[in-house]
Image: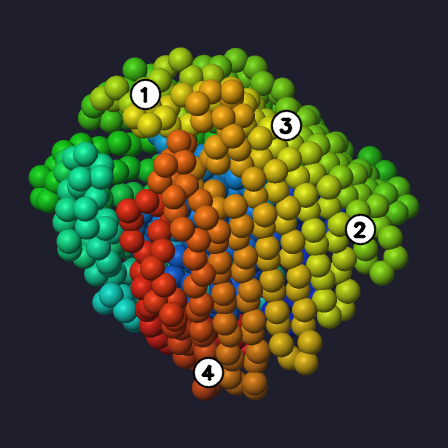
């Protein structure tokens, strides 16, 4: 196994995220950086990983990040009423704040609630997504109990030349979306600029009768809840002849969401992330990288046109990473991460600022057919003191691409500012940090025309933070999550098939009145099948998504019924750089809910015109 010295995931957006043609890439193991913070192939990762490329995005024609990721192994979403409404991710049955989300190497997510605003991320500005399942606190620190998702924005190529891109989408519920991009580069430099906008009249987010159900927290407003978004992105970099490299990235998303509420029913949002990185090789076997970044988000809340309040949060961050090749096929990584979190609100929080500093070390080695990865980290949280985490993983390669892997890791999560101090009596300053221990066993195989993988895992979480029947956060002394994930990919006679299946058992085990109950909003089973085929200039495809029964609350009183949806899609490349795409979502008009009493879109049709020289 040849280890490539790559200092941080931030650099990879310019180096490794250039997507090859999907038909060719399907038989190869893609390069990833999120699993180990260094560049390795997916086959070398001793964890369960998924990679979504730009070619996948244009093939699947999603309108949102949740559209794109729903049904992947261990991944489920809860959405409060359609496009643009609050969307929470549950990775491997852990809490929605237990998945660390990065954009071009910069940590994102509200300092207030700990959630990344997936609903505000423009899918047309995304080049690539890497998903790593399982604990990663020993590399990234807090929050990575369920896994890590890294999103790489679109970038320029070093192949030279100026490349414009353009897309326009229209569809049901008065949807209109447009994107314009300009990218280019030379032997040493690359850049990309993108601007986009989206509007939809939306659906009625909350089902009739919700005002009675939620006892005044919501009102019956049988109207359409509109959503609009404007977004801008820019990134670029320069690489000198001696290997030194400077890169930077910036993404800003402005949204306006209408919803049903008795105290507020409209929000204007700002989501912004920016980062820069510089790397060089002081010695042939040593690469060092310094990176800085910031993410901020702001919510201005209104009741109709009257301003009622705001919440603003900011996270500054910096890291120093060193990758040292100590011998052939052996890589040692050492680094330090720092972050400072700040929150501000018109209502006031009892605490508004804290910082965290963490140091980590990782070893990766290959010995014949064996792979070994060891990592350890110590974090000092300014509010909750020191936390030690670690991980060990082993893999063995048999003949014909068959591999066995086993791993064990610990992780932690500090309560968010909302958990601790949210005004109006909804915070609990006595909360303790959550701590987890996970074990996993995996078996996988990759051949020329097909690949498959099965992973079984168990995660135990102490002091899990959950909302009680009065929506008051408290610690559950113990929770246990067991799961099995399977995936199968086949490329045969021009057909491309991807299938995913997840079985999940997330249980409360605190010995109290809810002991044995299923943790909220985690379906016990999910499945997804993608089937695609190209016929020359034409492409067709279908996606089937299914989810089993879940519960919306810790007491398991409010069930969420299982469901299955079917999407059809087609495309026509009518000119060398031009393509028209059509998608029919939820073909059979299934009614379903992922959050109790909140609607999801019914049957919807979309049409896209795309200009992209990369289609050649």
| Residue 324 in the figure: left or right of residue 587 | right
In primary-sequence order, the first of circles 3 and 2 is 2
| Residue 191 in the figure: left or right of residue 28 | left
Residue under the point 39% across and 71% down = 587
Residue 552 in the image, given as x and y percentages of width and height: 38, 40
Comparing labels 2 and 4, the label whose residue is closer to the camera: 2
- Look at mark 1 in the image and give the residue it sits on: 427
Which mark identifies residue 11?
A: none
Q: Residues within 10 Å of mark 4 (few under 14, many from 20)?
A: some
Count how many numbered circles sit on residues in the image. 4
Which mark identifies residue 572?
A: 4
Residue under the point 46% across and 48% down = 549
In primary-sequence order, the first of circles 1 and 3 is 1
Cα distance in 3D space between marks 1 and 3 = 26 Å
Residue under the point 40% across and 13% down = 430
Which mark identifies residue 437?
A: 3
Please say if 394 is above or below 361. below
Q: Nearer the viewer, residue 486 or 46?
A: 486
- Look at mark 2 in the image and give the residue it sits on: 403
Q: Quadrant of residue 412?
A: top right
Residue under the point 79% across and 47% down = 404
Instruction: Tell me the SS state at disc 1.
Output: loop
Cα distance in 3D space between marks 3 and 2 = 24 Å
In primary-sequence order, the first of circles 2 and 1 is 2
Cα distance in 3D space between marks 4 and 3 = 49 Å
Cα distance in 3D space between marks 2 and 4 = 39 Å
Comparing labels 4 and 1, the label whose residue is closer to the camera: 1
């Amino acid at each position: 196994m040849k280890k490539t010295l790559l200092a941080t995931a931030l650099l990879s957006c310019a180096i490794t995220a250039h997507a090859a043609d999907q038909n060719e890439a399907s038989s190869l193991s893609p390069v990833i950086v999120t699993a180990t913070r260094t560049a390795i192939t997916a086959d070398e990762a001793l964890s369960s990983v998924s990679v979504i490329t730009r070619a996948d995005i244009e093939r699947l024609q999603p309108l949102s990040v949740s559209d794109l990721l729903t049904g992947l192994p261990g991944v489920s979403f809860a959405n409060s009423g359609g496009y643009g409404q609050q969307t929470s991710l549950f990775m491997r049955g852990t809490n929605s704040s237990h998945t660390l989300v990065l954009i071009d190497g910069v940590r994102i997510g509200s300092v207030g609630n700990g959630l990344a605003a997936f609903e505000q991320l423009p899918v047309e500005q995304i080049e690539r997504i890497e998903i790593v399942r399982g604990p990663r606190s020993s590399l990234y620190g807090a929050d990575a109990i369920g896994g890590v998702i890294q999103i790489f924005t679109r970038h320029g190529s070093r192949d030279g030349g100026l490349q414009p891109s353009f897309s326009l989408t229209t569809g049901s519920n008065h949807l209109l979306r447009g994107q314009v991009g300009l990218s280019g580069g030379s032997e040493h430099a690359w850049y990309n600029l993108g601007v986009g906008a989206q509007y939809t009249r939306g659906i009625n987010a909350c089902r009739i009768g919700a005002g009675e159900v939620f006892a005044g927290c919501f009102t019956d407003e049988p109207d359409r809840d509109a959503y609009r978004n404007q977004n801008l992105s820019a990134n670029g970099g320069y690489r000198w002849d001696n290997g030194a490299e400077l890169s930077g990235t910036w993404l800003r998303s402005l949204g306006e969401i209408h919803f049903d509420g008795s105290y507020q029913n409209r929000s204007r949002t700002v989501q912004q992330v920016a980062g820069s990185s510089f790397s060089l090789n002081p010695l042939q076997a040593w690469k060092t990288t310094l990176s800085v970044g910031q993410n901020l988000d702001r919510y201005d809340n209104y009741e109709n046109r009257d301003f009622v309040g705001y919440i603003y949060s900011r996270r500054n961050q910096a890291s120093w990473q060193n990758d040292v090749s100590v011998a052939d096929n052996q890589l040692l990584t050492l680094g330090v991460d720092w972050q400072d979190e700040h929150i501000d609100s018109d209502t006031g929080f009892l605490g508004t600022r804290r910082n965290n500093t963490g140091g980590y070390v990782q070893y990766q080695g290959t010995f014949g057919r064996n792979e070994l990865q060891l990592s350890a980290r110590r974090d000092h949280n300014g509010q909750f003191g020191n936390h030690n985490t670690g991980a060990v993983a082993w893999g063995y390669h048999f003949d014909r691409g068959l591999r066995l892997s086993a791993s064990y890791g610990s992780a932690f999560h500090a309560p968010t500012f909302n958990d601790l101090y949210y005004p109006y009596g909804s915070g609990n300053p006595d909360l303790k940090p959550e701590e987890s221990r996970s074990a996993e066993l995996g078996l996988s195989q990759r051949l020329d025309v097909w690949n498959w993988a099965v992973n079984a895992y168990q995660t135990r979480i102490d002091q899990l933070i959950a909302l009680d029947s009065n929506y008051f956060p408290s610690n559950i002394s113990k929770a246990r999550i067991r799961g099995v994930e399977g995936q199968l990919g086949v490329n045969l006679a021009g057909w491309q098939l991807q299938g995913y299946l997840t079985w999940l058992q997330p249980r409360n085990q605190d010995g109290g009145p809810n002991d044995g109950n299923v943790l909220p909003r985690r379906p016990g089973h999910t499945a997804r099948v993608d089937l695609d085929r190209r016929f020359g200039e034409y492409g067709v495809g279908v996606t089937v998504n299914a989810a089993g029964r879940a519960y919306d609350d810790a007491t398991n009183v409010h069930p969420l019924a299982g469901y299955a949806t079917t999407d059809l899609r087609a495309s026509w490349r009518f000119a060398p750089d031009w393509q028209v795409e059509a998608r029919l979502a939820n073909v059979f008009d299934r009614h379903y809910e992922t959050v109790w009493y909140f609607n999801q879109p019914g049957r919807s049709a979309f049409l896209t015109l795309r200009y992209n020289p990369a289609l050649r």
